[in-house]
Amino acid sequence: MYRDNSLMPKEAVRLVVLGTLIQGGPLRYADLAGSVRHFLDRIMGPSLDLMGTSLEMLRYEGLIEALDGSGMEDNALLGPTPAGRTEFDTLMRANVRAPSADGLNKLVIALKLRFLHLLEPESQRDQIDNLVALCETELARLGDLKRADVGSDVGSDSHFASWLDLDIAQAEDRLAWFQGLLARL
């Protein structure tokens, strides 16, 4: 994890693997690898940062185990270990970094939402409350940037100001969506 307790790419992959197994139950090695690759590719596109974590490494670390067979060579059935369930819980509670165009940030939010139902109700509310606060911080940052741009030589008629308005509208929509989700939990 980063110093701010947010996930690094390797940990995001761990969260995909562990969440997939905890949510759906044990999977064959090839099915799990395909499911993880499909999800990551659709959220972030191909990424060298995310290709480095292997299922074998998670087995070696004791986070997943072969329930029959031995691993990749015989397409073993894989499931999470108790240590893997603990790691899943830790990863789900990790912070989300301040919003940016960062694909990793989008992945972490997607993972939190995909596996949110696996947490206790109070933890679910805590996670969404954190995302609400993140959106509020993002809106404050964008608003400050917009106020500074209006006073600049470029002014509010620039392409930058128009793009900034779009970004603000998207952040407001995200905030409203997360607030609605929090109200439903």
Image (cartoon, rainbow, N blue to C red):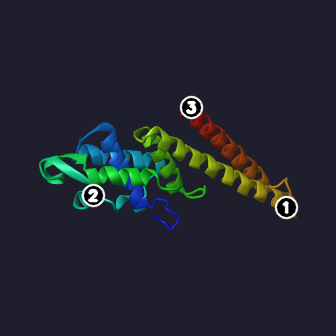
Image spot of residue 64 (x, y percent): 25, 52
Q: What x and y, as percent, mark residue 147?
A: 82, 57
Disc 1 marks a residue whose amino acid type is Val
Please tell me which residue is depicted at 36% across the width and 59% down the height of the picture. Answer: 51
Q: Is residue 130 left or right of residue 43?
A: right
Q: Which residue is mark 2?
A: 58
Q: Residue at x 74, y 52 (%)?
A: 164
Q: Which element is circle 3 on?
A: helix
Q: Residue at x 44, y 45 (%)?
A: 42
User: Type of residue at label 3?
Assistant: Arg
Instruction: Estimate the x, y position of residue 2 in percent, counting from the top left.
Output: 48, 66
Which of these two is toward me, 95 or 71?
A: 95
Image quadrant for the N terminus? bottom left
User: In this view, which residue lies farthest toward the front?
Assistant: 122
Horizontal placement of 136 versus 184: left or right? Answer: right
Q: Return the disc, 1 or 3, that comes first in the chain's sequence.
A: 1
Q: CA distance from mark 2 to mark 1?
A: 52 Å
What SS does tag 2 mark? helix
Q: Is residue 4 above or below residue 79?
A: below
Residue at disc 1, secondary structure: loop
> Depth-wise, is mark 2 or mark 1 nearer the camera?
2
Q: Which residue is mark 1?
A: 154
